[in-house]
Structures are given as C-alpha cells and as structure tokens.
C-alpha cells in the first residue's frame, strides 16, 4: 500500500514539481483515499484520483490598473476550475501577495472535497490575485476589482462558476466585482456569493465559516460527552473567519483569550467579551488597522510581536488565519498546555507534522475541509435563494447550517472510525471522495 501511495505521489510530483502546497494537499488526501480505492473494486482501473488531481481548466491573466498617483500597476489574476462532476465550480477568490498557482491549486483541490461534504451540488474551484489590498485606498481597490472582473467575467456565470470571498476579499470587494460583472453582462444574476443583503446576499453568510467551525468543534466534543461551554479558546487571525468563530464561542459561554494577524498575537487573560469583539470588528473591517491596537484600548492584554498564539494555554484551538500556520512545535505546546480539541477555520493551517502529533495524542482534530465547510454551505444556500428569488430568515439559514455541520460530522465518523479514535481527516477525505468519484464514473471519460 505504502508503495502505491509513494508511486502515485512521485508521478504527480514530477508534473507539479514547483507546487509544494498543492503536493502537500495531494499527499494528505492520497494517504487515506488510495487504501479506500484499493479496497473498492468499482474504482479499479479508472485512474480516478489521477483525474481528480488535474484541474479541468486553469485561467491565468494580466490585471492592469491605475493607482492613486497615476502609475500603471500590473498584477496576475487566476481561476482554477478544478472539478465540475457534481455541480458548477464554486470557491473563493484570494487577494494576497503570496498568491501563486500552487496555493490556488491546493485550495481548489481541497474545495472539491469540502463542497462534496456539504451535500449541496457544487463542484470545486478557487482563484485570486497576487494583489495586496493592504494600504490601498477605496478607489484603488475598486479599480483593481473592476479590472480583475473585466477578464474573469468571460469564464464564470451562475451555472458555470460562482466565486466568493477568501483572504483579502470581503463584502466590499465582492460588491465592486459584482457591479462590474453586471455592467459587462447586462444581467443581475447570482454569479458571486457573499453579496450584500439588499442585492441578493444571504443572512448568516458573513458569519457562516466561523460559526460552522465552532459548531463542528461542539459536535466533536458532544460526541465524547463534552462541550464548548466554559472552555478557554485560542483563535488565530482576526479576519472574517476568526471574528465570527470568536462571536459564536462567546455566545456558547466559552472564554476566547487570543486573536492575531500577520504582525503578531494578542493575549487577553480576562477574555474577549462581546464588547471587545465589536471593537476588533470595527478596527479590522472599518479602520483596517493592526490587531496590536487592541492593547492600547485594553492595556491589561498583552501583544506578542511576530508570534503565533499557540503557546497560550487553552482547551480548544481554532486556527483561522492561513495555511501552515501551526507546526509540530506549536502542536506539542498546545497538547502540553491541555488542549483537547482543534477545529480548523482556515484551509490547511496545520502542517502534516502537527497533525501527526494530534493523532498520536488522540486529541480531537478536524481538518478544514470538514470544519470550515459552513462558509461554502451557506454560499450554496445563497445560490438557492437567488434561484428562488426569495430570502430565508436568519433562524432558517442558521438552522440549515447547523444541520449541515452535523451531517458532515456524522459522515466523518462513518468513514473515519478507527480503534478507539475518530480519524476525522480520513473520514472527510473518503466521504468527500465517494460522491465526486461516483459522479465522474457515471459521466464517462470527459
Ligand atoms: P481575512 O482576509 O478576512 O482574514 C485573514 C486573517 O488571517 C487576517 O487576520 C490576516 O492578518 C491573517 N493572515 C493572513 N495571512 C497571514 C499570514 N501569512 N500569517 C499570519 N496571519 C495571516 O480572511 P478569512 O478570514 O476569510 O480567511 C481566513 C482563512 O479561512 C483562510 O485560510 C481562508 O482560506 C479560510 N476560509 C475562509 C472562508 C470564508 O468564508 N471567508 C471559507 C473557508 C475557509 P493580516 O490582516 O495581517 O494579513
């Protein structure tokens, strides 16, 4: 078995030698899915995983825009249309200077499994640009978004590919891109999700990824007769996912003691209250400032420059910033300090070495493709509401989100049960794989 996996990884690695993040995601899936394929005859001789790791289409394009000083800037735009076996491509757009093909292919590949897990009919894709929104004026952001969409609009549509937000792309950017799409296509249609409420958005969409990550942690803890209530929680990041993960933890009576950004982490031993969180939301979403400002407002808190929060004692850890932000040393530190549950809000935030520490210590660990699927699930609900030309209430959407997170949790148990331990990673990979692979087999070699 080990040889089949290594042979597969070597072959894919030769074709994608410059793409470490993509290869990391492929290896992680292969280690659990290849044994499943070997033990299930219907997949034999079909090269099914080989087909799944090759994107159906990759678009790469120039994005010109003019900055406030009149200088012409050039960025690179991408859309990876990974797999459309179970529905139109669906996945976010990321604007961050680190964006490259490797990162977008890893995200698109993960998205295929995640979308399959939601039980909604969505294929997988991802896109973005190496554009850095930090420090840009509103006008610059708008001109960039318009230029990006002026090329992307040819390749997307409500029945083809429906992008959403991700790092660096929130409500403001979705608005500018939606406006440009509408102008170019002369139609008002649900081509993007994460839209504003008055123009086709869904209630709970901004909250969905963070809330869903906490619902998943609650499901894991409930399964071992425990709960989020009363626990100390460490969260990384202070963007969309981190903010609403914190909000839901506070609502469930847990104590959130940290948030972070790329300049460092804050530690508030008294706990981040609803009021303090409101301050953070204004700081990050409106003023677009750094998290270090928190300690000026709340001087009892500490700021650790350029440090991640994983040395802070906690029972629950929610990595909600970016890929590979939690390594083996961090994982050991979390375990030594009493952490019993890790639910990933970000995509692939834990390195393979960190995951193996969690597994060895038999603590609850949920991979992002399962635990952060709430965001895309509510995007799917936004698409459904757009098609119906109807809006569900906050309670209706939240209740559907809870049900979906529980279904994903149970699917992970079905396929991830090992002796005395639930391997959520294995469960998520296999459950996600089955639906996509079966659809691909039914649709022939296309
Ligand atoms: P935001 O842009 O709103 O926030 C990102 C946060 O992560 C910021 O606090 C940012 O800090 C921090 N961050 C980004 N890059 C780094 C880095 N290299 N090192 C340290 N901190 C970093 O993004 P989201 O909250 O939307 O996304 C966060 C994660 O969740 C990503 O992995 C994304 O793929 C994943 N995700 C998001 C979904 C969504 O619905 N938005 C859905 C599913 C997954 P700074 O401001 O300093 O850059």
Image (tube, rainbow, N blue to C red):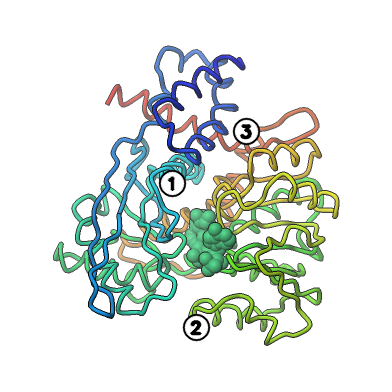
Look at the numbered discs 2 and 1 and tell me whether their residues touch, using CB distance below 8 Å: no
- The residue drawn where x is 80% and y is 57% is 315
Q: Is residue 318 above or below residue 100?
A: below
Q: Residue furthest bottom?
A: 297
Q: Helix or strand or loop: what does disc 1 sit on?
A: loop
Q: Badge 2 local density, few (<14 within 10 Å), some, or many (20+)?
A: few
Q: CA distance from mark 3 to mark 1?
A: 21 Å
Picture coordinates of residue 125 (x, y %)? 37, 46
Mark 2–mark 3 distance (CA, rounded to whole Å): 41 Å
Q: Which residue is mark 1?
A: 120
Say whether residue 321 is left or right of residue 153: right
The answer to which quarter of the image holds residue 4 is top right
Residue 261 image point, x, y percent = 59, 67
The secondary structure type at the circle numbered 2 is loop
Asked whether 256 or 428 is in front, the reply is 256
Q: Quadrant of the C terminus?
A: top left
* In front: label 2 or label 3: 2
Q: Quadrant of residue 255?
A: bottom right
Query: What residue sits 49% from the left and 34% below the top?
Result: 23
Q: Nearer the viewer, residue 334 or 399?
A: 334
Give x and y (percent) for residue 66: 23, 72
Tell me which numbered mark, 3 or 1, is placed earlier along the sequence.
1
- Looking at the image, which residue is at 65% across and 59% down? 214
Q: Which residue is mark 3?
A: 426
């Amino acid at each position: 078995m080990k040889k089949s996996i290594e042979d597969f990884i070597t072959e894919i690695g030769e074709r994608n030698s410059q793409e470490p993040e993509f290869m990391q995601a492929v290896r992680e899936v292969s280690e659990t899915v290849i044994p499943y394929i070997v033990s299930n005859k219907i997949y034999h001789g079909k090269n099914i995983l080989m087909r799944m790791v090759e994107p159906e289409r990759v678009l790469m394009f120039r994005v010109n825009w003019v900055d406030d000083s009149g200088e012409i800037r050039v960025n690179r735009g991408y859309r990876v249309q990974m797999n459309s076996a179970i529905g139109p491509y669906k996945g976010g757009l990321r604007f961050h200077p680190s964006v490259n093909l490797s990162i977008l292919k890893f995200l698109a590949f993960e998205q295929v499994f995640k979308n399959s897990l939601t039980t909604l009919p969505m294929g997988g894709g991802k896109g973005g640009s190496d554009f850095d929104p930090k420090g840009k004026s509103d006008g610059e952001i708008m001109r960039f978004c318009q230029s990006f969409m002026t090329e992307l609009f040819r390749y997307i549509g409500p029945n083809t590919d429906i992008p959403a937000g991700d790092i660096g792309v929130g409500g403001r950017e979705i608005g500018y891109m939606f406006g440009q799409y509408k102008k170019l296509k002369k139609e008002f249609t649900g081509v993007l999700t994460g839209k504003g409420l008055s123009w086709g958005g869904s209630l709970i969409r901004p909250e969905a990824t963070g809330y869903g990550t906490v619902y998943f942690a609650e499901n894991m803890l409930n399964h071992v007769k425990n709960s989020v209530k009363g626990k100390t929680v460490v969260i990384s990041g202070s963007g969309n996912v981190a903010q609403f993960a914190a909000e839901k933890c506070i609502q469930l009576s847990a104590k959130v003691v940290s948030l972070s950004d790329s300049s460092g982490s804050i530690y508030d031993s008294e706990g981040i209250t609803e009021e303090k969180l409101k301050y953070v939301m204004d700081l990050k979403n409106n003023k677009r400032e750094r998290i270090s400002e928190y300690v000026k407002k709340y001087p009892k808190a500490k700021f650790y420059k350029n440090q991640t929060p994983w040395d802070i004692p906690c029972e629950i850890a929610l990595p909600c910033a970016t890929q590979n932000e939690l390594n083996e040393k961090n994982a050991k530190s979390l375990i030594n300090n009493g952490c019993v549950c890790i639910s990933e809000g970000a995509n692939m935030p834990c390195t393979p070495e960190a995951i193996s520490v969690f597994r060895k210590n038999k603590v609850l660990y949920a991979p992002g493709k399962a635990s952060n699927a709430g965001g895309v699930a509510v995007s799917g609900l936004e698409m459904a509401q757009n098609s119906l030309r109807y809006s569900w209430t906050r309670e209706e959407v939240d209740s559907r989100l809870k049900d979906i997170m529980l279904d994903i949790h149970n699917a992970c148990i079905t396929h991830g049960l090992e002796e005395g331990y639930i391997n959520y990673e294995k469960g998520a990979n296999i459950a996600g794989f089955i639906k996509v692979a079966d659809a691909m087999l039914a649709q022939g070699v296309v």
